[in-house]
Amino acid sequence: MSNETDYRKMYMQLSSQYVRDVEKLHLALKDLYNSHAGMEKSCGHDFTCVCAGDKARELIELFE
């Protein structure tokens, strides 16, 4: 049973990390949209700054 418990614990940790990563990506994409639309980003800036949205844009451009 110890292996099953370890597997379950690892699964829950990975699931939690996945959810956090998806939430960060969602916020970064919202900030990217807001930046292009001239709206305020989650950091409070309405101009280009080094925030998650700008990092998301860099990643998107990298894969284009």
Image (spheres, rainbow, N blue to C red):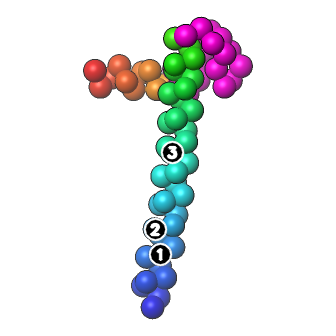
**Amino acid under label 1?**
Arg
SS under mark 3: helix
- Give the Cα separation between the discs numbered 1 and 2: 5 Å
The residue that disc 2 covers is 11
Residue 41: quarter of image = top right
Q: Residue 37 bears which disc, if any? A: none
Residue 57: quarter of image = top left
Residue occupying image coordinates x 59% and y 8% = 38
Q: Main secondary structure of the magenta part?
A: loop
Q: Nearer the viewer, residue 3 or 22?
A: 22
**Amino acid under label 3?**
Asp
- Whether 46 is drawn above or below 27: the answer is above
The residue that disc 1 covers is 8
Question: In which quadrant is the C terminus drawn?
Answer: top left
Residue occupying image coordinates x 52% and y 20% = 32
Looking at the image, residue 20 sits to the left or right of residue 10; the answer is right
Residue occupying image coordinates x 43% and y 83% = 4
The reply to whether the magenta stretch includes residue 38 is: yes
Residue occupying image coordinates x 43% and y 76% = 7
- Whether 8 is drawn above or below 31: the answer is below
| Numbered range of the magenta stretch | 37-54
Kindly check if marks 1 and 2 are in contact, taking CB atoms under 8 A apart as contact. yes
Q: Position of residue 22 (x, y in %)?
A: 49, 43
Q: Earlier in the sequence, mark 2 or mark 3?
A: 2
Q: Position of residue 33 (x, y in %)?
A: 52, 19
- Give the Cα separation between the discs numbered 2 and 3: 15 Å
Residue 16: quarter of image = bottom right
SS under mark 1: helix
Q: Earlier in the sequence, mark 3 or mark 1?
A: 1
Q: Residue 21 bears which disc, if any? A: 3
Q: Position of residue 37 (x, y in %)?
A: 55, 10
